Amino acid sequence: MGTGEFKEVERYISQIRPYLRADGGDISLVDVLEDGTVKVRLKGACRGCPMDQVTIKNTVEAYLKSRLPFIKKVVPV
């Protein structure tokens, strides 16, 4: 996808970031693919946490999909 979509996704990721930081973690946007896949990297306490998949699906993916209809899934890298 273009830089416009990347910036739009990054804007919403930045709204999620404070919640992850409150638990000692963080997130960074790696890429937004043509098929609507968003690649993210969890950091800090979130990286390797037993709940990282739940965080990605129930928090990050749900939030992004509710605001950006072109998002199909969010995957960790």
Image: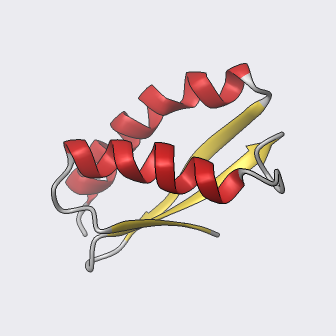
x, y (%) of residue 37?
37, 71
> Which residue occupies 35% across, 35% down?
11
x, y (%) of residue 62?
37, 48
Towards the viewer: 48 or 10: 48
Q: Is residue 57 left or right of residue 45?
A: left
Q: Is residue 15 above or below residue 54?
A: above
Q: Quadrant of the N terminus?
A: bottom left
Question: How is the protein colored in the picture?
Answer: secondary structure
Q: Is residue 49 left or right of residue 38?
A: right
Q: Quadrant of the C terminus?
A: bottom right
> Which residue occupies 23% across, 45% down?
66
> Which residue occupies 56% across, 30% down?
17
Q: Is residue 52 left or right of residue 65?
A: right
Towards the viewer: 10 or 63: 63
Q: Is residue 33 above or below residue 57?
A: below
Residue 71: quarter of image: bottom left
Towards the viewer: 53 or 12: 53
> Which residue occupies 73% across, 51% down?
51
- Residue at the left extreme, as displayed: 69
x, y (%) of residue 64?
33, 47
Q: Is residue 63 above or below residue 71?
A: above
For the image, the number of numbered tags is 0
Residue 8: quarter of image: top left
Towards the viewer: 17 or 51: 51
Q: Is residue 71 left or right of residue 54?
A: left
